[in-house]
């Protein structure tokens, strides 16, 4: 169905019957975190039995309590990761995972077995020119506006009106409802001493004029807090949170030296609090793009001094990264880390950083052998940062990497890790 074929109907929330639009066997999705159209998603779950058969939901990272394992009586849940409240579904054994790079979402969600049939959106009200804004999320939603059979929008008067690659008109929608509710906000995080030490090491790798990509959580926020003495930083990232907004408002991020999108911070989505949302509202210096742009390796490689900053659950002594599962539970994601890391490797003066605490209460996170999948292969060598220092693995042999990695591992585990690696190496040698 093309955009021009849609005919928007405005419906009162109390009168909206989603069973008129959702068919058995359909796959449905919506924006993640603060971009979730909570009125629509709550109504979908409440009306799930009226659909008359099972349907699927593809959900990104979630902050809401909308989805519950009890809904699996009618709904199959699929996600790209197990973060946020998705963890409840995973713990109940009700969550299937689509292990997909962010850069591949365009194809994965517009065709094939995971094609989206029904798209639920949160949009900001139309401006004086009749343009609705996708508000705080473009990312993988943009191509679905054209490919989905049905597009239903919650026009939220409290959602920020933002700039981006895709504006919408009334004929982009099949159904509109109107609400006014504060978008969901990012949970509070707090950096401890270990995060601050990691942040100091990571910040030492970021020069004036660099363009940065930061994830979410206490560690990326701690790294951002160490950059207030930098000048003319740029932002090209999957998501912008409060820590990046702080840098913009402090004059640290100007985007003045970016080799593309000069003067503009670019992101796929915004995952922050009302402070971040207020900053983005009608601010043309913060613009949103789809994942086809934000995670494109050629785009990233064209940004001089692009610094990709991501985290991990564990890293082995040769530089392999597990960012997905721990203890048999899927708590992370493939996500966009490898897209950004490969872009940084192509960038002139770029660097890919993987930052993590070296240990947990149960043991070392620098390991001789990963306990989960290889999310990033060792051939995409990165700079590993822990509270004990920096291990630059680029251009090193396996033996050289082991030496560097042991230096950033927990001191009390280094001897054990070296012995375990030696035993592992002997087992893999030909007889």
Image (cartoon, grey):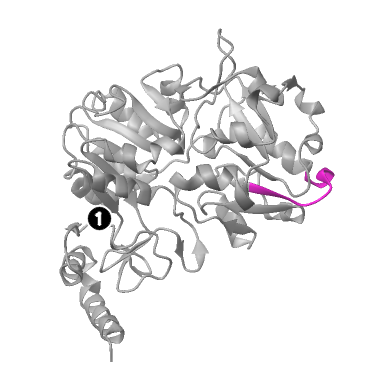
Left or right, 56 with respect to 316, comes to right
Residue 293 percent location from the top left of the image: 41, 35
Q: Which segment is the magenta one? A: 48-57
Q: Using the image as rendered, state which of residue 347 and residue 89 is in the foreground.
A: 347
**Residue 280 percent location from the top left of the image:** 43, 23
Q: Is residue 63 above or below residue 405?
A: above
SS class, disc 1: loop
Res. 59 in view:
yes
Q: Is residue 29 or residue 86 the one in the foreground?
A: 29
Q: Position of residue 397 (x, y in %)?
A: 17, 68
Q: Is residue 221 left or right of residue 23?
A: left
Residue 287, picture quadrant: top left
Q: Is residue 191 visible?
A: no
User: Height in image: 33 above or below 279?
Assistant: below
| Quarter containing the N terminus | top right
Q: Quadrant of residue 122?
A: top right
Residue 341: in magenta span: no
Image quarter where the C terminus lies is: bottom left
Across the whole image, how many numbered discs are drawn on residues? 1
The residue carrying mark 1 is: 382
């Amino acid at each position: 169905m093309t955009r021009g074929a849609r005919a928007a109907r405005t419906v009162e929330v109390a009168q909206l019957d989603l069973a008129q639009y959702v068919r058995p066997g359909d796959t449905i999705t919506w924006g993640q975190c603060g971009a979730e159209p909570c009125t629509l998603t709550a109504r979908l779950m409440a009306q799930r039995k009226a659909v008359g058969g099972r349907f699927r939901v593809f959900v990104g990272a979630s902050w809401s309590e909308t989805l519950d394992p009890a809904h699996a009586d009618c709904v199959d849940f699929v996600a790209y990761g197990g973060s946020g409240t998705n963890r409840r579904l995973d713990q109940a054994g009700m969550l299937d995972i689509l292990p997909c790079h962010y850069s591949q979402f365009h194809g994965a969600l517009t065709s094939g077995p995971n094609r989206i049939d029904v798209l639920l959106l949160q949009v900001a009200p139309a401006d004086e020119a009749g343009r609705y804004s996708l508000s705080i999320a473009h990312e993988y939603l943009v191509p679905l506006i054209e490919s989905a059979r049905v597009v239903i929008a919650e026009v939220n008067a409290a959602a920020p009106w933002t700039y981006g690659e895709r504006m919408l008109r009334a004929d982009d929608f099949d159904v509109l409802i109107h609400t006014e509710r504060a978008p969901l906000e990012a949970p509070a995080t707090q950096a401890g001493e270990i995060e601050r030490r990691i942040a100091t090491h990571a910040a030492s790798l970021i020069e004036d004029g660099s363009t940065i990509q930061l994830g979410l959580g206490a560690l990326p926020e701690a790294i951002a807090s160490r950059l207030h003495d930098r000048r003319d930083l740029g932002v090209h990232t999957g998501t912008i949170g409060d820590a990046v907004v702080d840098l913009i408002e402090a004059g640290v991020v100007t985007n003045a030296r970016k080799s593309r999108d000069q003067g503009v911070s670019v992101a796929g989505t915004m995952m922050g609090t009302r402070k971040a949302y207020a900053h983005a509202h009608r601010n043309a210096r913060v613009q949103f793009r789809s994942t086809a742009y934000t995670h494109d390796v050629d785009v990233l490689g064209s940004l001089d001094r692009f610094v990709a900053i991501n985290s991990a659950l564990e890293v082995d002594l040769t530089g392999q990264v597990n960012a997905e599962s721990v203890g048999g539970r899927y708590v992370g994601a493939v996500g966009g880390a490898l897209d950004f890391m490969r872009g940084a490797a192509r960038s002139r003066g770029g660097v890919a950083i993987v930052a993590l605490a070296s240990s947990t209460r149960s043991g070392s996170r620098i390991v001789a052998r990963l306990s989960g999948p290889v999310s990033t292969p060792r051939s995409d060598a990165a700079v590993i940062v822990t509270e004990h220092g920096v291990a630059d693995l680029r251009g090193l042999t396996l033996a050289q990497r082991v030496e560097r990695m042991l230096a950033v591992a927990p001191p009390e585990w280094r001897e054990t890790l070296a012995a375990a690696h030696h035993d592992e190496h002997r087992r893999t040698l030909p007889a």
